[in-house]
């Protein structure tokens, strides 16, 4: 009995393990897994499960970088794609193709890896910032918001979400069937 592509991908995902970050990005002072190293680690598992990996860029209006994984036995496939940015510098374009190949492949396979250089490029911090503390809402302002709800339901939703409500205020909302 031939396994479906989903069964093969499930088995492959359970065998992948951690992908080692063996390349360094000196600009962002971060580590990432190189696309060639990633494929080198995946290739034995792809062969074992009779899966074929293809990653062509294709133009259909926009230029997209595709990642396809085909089941050799059934012809089924899964795909992921991302739009290639419009770049005139061929070296930057090549880097973007490589980056999108890595992103689409890791997304398609659900690889567990922190994207250090992507986070640095988007100025995302490694540690999530703590949520800002919400202010408490005075009784008068709360009562006014509840009155406003009848004529403008979005008002209460937009404004009350900004505040910490006490148990009494939450009970009033519940009794009036007001959902934030």
Image (spheres, rainbow, N blue to C red):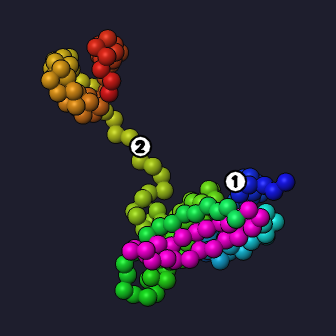
Asked if residue 8 lies left or right of residue 169, the reply is: right
What residue is at 28 percent from the left and 14 percent from the top? Answer: 176
Instruction: Looking at the image, tell me whether mark 2 or mark 1 is earlier in sequence order.
Output: 1
Pinpoint residue 50: horizontal percent, then vertical percent: 78, 66
User: In the rendered image of this protein, does residue 107 appear above or below residue 174?
Assistant: below
Asked if residue 36 lies left or right of residue 152, the reply is: right
What residue is at 45 percent from the left and 82 percent from the top? Answer: 93
- Which quarter of the picture shows residue 70? bottom right
**Residue 19 visible in the snapshot:** no
Q: Dot 1 corresponds to which residue?
A: 6
Label 1: which secondary element: helix
Magenta region's main secondary structure?
Answer: strand
- Which quarter of the picture shows residue 146? top left
User: In the rendered image of this protein, does residue 60 appear above or below residue 132?
Assistant: below
* Callout 2 crowding tier (Cα within 10 Å): few <14, some 14–19, many ≥20: few
- Say which mark, if any, is on residue 130: 2
Label 2: which secondary element: loop
Quadrant including the N terminus: bottom right
State which mark lies toward you, 2 or 1.
1
**Residue 161 visible in the snapshot:** yes
Q: From this viewpoint, which residue is outermost toward the bottom?
A: 90
Cα gap from disc 2 to disc 1, whole angstroms: 38 Å
* Callout 1 crowding tier (Cα within 10 Å): few <14, some 14–19, many ≥20: few
8 inside magenta stretch: no
Pinpoint residue 143: horizontal percent, then vertical percent: 18, 17
Q: Which residues are magenta?
A: 51-74
Asked if residue 79 lies left or right of residue 144, the reply is: right
Pinpoint residue 19: horizontal percent, then vertical percent: 68, 64
Quadrant including the C terminus: top left
């Amino acid at each position: 009995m031939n396994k479906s592509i989903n069964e093969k991908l499930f088995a492959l995902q359970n065998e992948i393990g951690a992908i080692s970050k063996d390349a360094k990005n000196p600009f962002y002072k971060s580590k990432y897994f190189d696309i060639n190293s990633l494929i080198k680690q995946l290739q034995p598992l792809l062969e074992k499960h009779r899966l074929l990996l293809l990653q062509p860029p294709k133009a259909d209006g926009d230029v997209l970088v595709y990642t396809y994984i085909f089941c050799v036995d059934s012809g089924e496939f899964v795909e992921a794609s991302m739009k290639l940015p419009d770049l005139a510098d061929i070296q930057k374009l090549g880097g973007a193709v490589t980056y999108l190949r890595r992103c689409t492949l890791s997304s398609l396979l659900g690889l567990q890896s922190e994207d250090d250089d992507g986070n640095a490029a988007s100025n995302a911090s490694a540690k999530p910032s703590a949520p800002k503390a919400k202010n408490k809402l005075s009784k008068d302002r709360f009562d006014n918001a509840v009155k406003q709800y009848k004529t403008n339901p979005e008002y209460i939703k937009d404004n009350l979400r900004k505040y910490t409500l006490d148990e009494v205020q939450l009970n009033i909302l519940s009794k009036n069937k007001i959902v934030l």
